[in-house]
Image: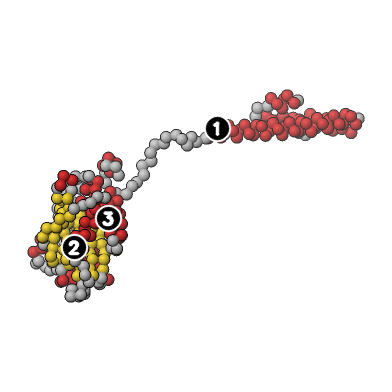
Amino acid sequence: MKDDIQKVDSLEKLQELYTATFGKNGTMTAKLKTMATLSNEERAVLNNENTELRQLFKQKQTELENAALNAKLATEAVDVTLDVEPENKGTLHPLTWALKEIAAILESFGYTLWTGPEVEDDWHNFTALNTPEYHPARDMQDSFFFENGNVMRTQTSSIQIRAMEKLGAPIKMFGIGSTYRKEMDATHSPMFHQIEGLYVDKNVTMSDLIGTLRALLSKFFEKEIEIRIRPSYFPFTEPSVEFDMKWEGGKWLEMGGAGMVHPNVLRNCKIDPEKYQGFAFGFGWDRLAMLKYGLTDLRPFYDGDVRWLKNNGF
Ligand code: DAH
């Protein structure tokens, strides 16, 4: 009997054997029924046998249950050291990366981030920026107009107007966003992005502007950047400049426009130009990202081709 229990190799068979032993018609049950007819010694022997068999059944059951559990663990085990197929996770777009860096730098200089509408009215995109209707400077920006006179924002300069109208002076803000013009080639897209900075206070000067641009670009490119300004013309600044930065191989790259905010622009925003003056600057955020990441063509930024993004390490 003991051997029979030892030999059992499954829980079902053990159950069967248990029933055959201790069940209603089991062998042990039959024996136990004779208890009353036995002598004291015989009873003791039977009692021992009874206890021993029950223990053996219990032991065997535990043994088989453990074996079953171990077998299950072995087949369901996960090898955490195994290489897995890399998951295709999304990442931020390179333009977003570049923007996050620029924004962090400008915020560290005390500038506050602003946005504005992309469909802009004439006042904010042109007139308040000292570019009234029939002003020849409107031709500098080939624009998409709506029949009601609204325009797809051609420049983020419109955001500085909105900010000054709302907060007055002193003010230190930057605006970011998409801008639209009718142009298209390797370095121009009908939709592109600009960053605009504005600082108006009592003693803001041109040298503050140059220092700010130099510090901003040096931080962004993580090296000392040399800046050069050239006289230029924008209706909303006087004097106006364009600024270049010295790049690899000593080449000067044109970066953007800037200047001292024109008194008319301040007046249009109800700021007294006798009390306040300031500088403004604007440049292409796409171009900044292209230079940072060593790209020569602007268009793939907008193609949404995941292979291109991957090949360029994004
Ligand atoms: N809005 C100009 C453009 O799109 C760039 C610019 C020039 C912005 C001078 C400025 C500025 O704020 O002061 O070409």
Q: Quadrant of the N terminus?
A: top right
Task: State the residue position of label 2.
Answer: 207
Mark closer to the chain start, 2 or 3: 3
The secondary element bearing badge 2 is classed as helix
User: How is the rendered protein coloured?
Assistant: secondary structure
User: What is the three-letter code of the residue carrying label 1?
Assistant: Ala
The Cα–Cα distance between marks 2 and 3, rounded to whole angstroms, is 21 Å
Distance Cα–Cα, label 2 vs label 1:
73 Å
Residue drawn at point x = 79 percent, y = 33 percent: 51
Q: Secondary structure at mark 1?
A: helix
Q: Which image quarter is the C terminus in?
A: top left
Of the residues tagged 1 and 3, which is closer to the observer? 3
Q: Considering the numbered disc 3 on the image, is that residue within a helix, a strand or a loop?
A: helix
Position of residue 118 measured from the top left corner of the image (x, y, whole percent): 23, 61
Q: Nearer the viewer, residue 278 or 6?
A: 278
The nearer-to-camera label among 2 and 1 is 2
- Which residue is under mark 3? 102
Q: Earlier in the sequence, mark 2 or mark 1?
A: 1
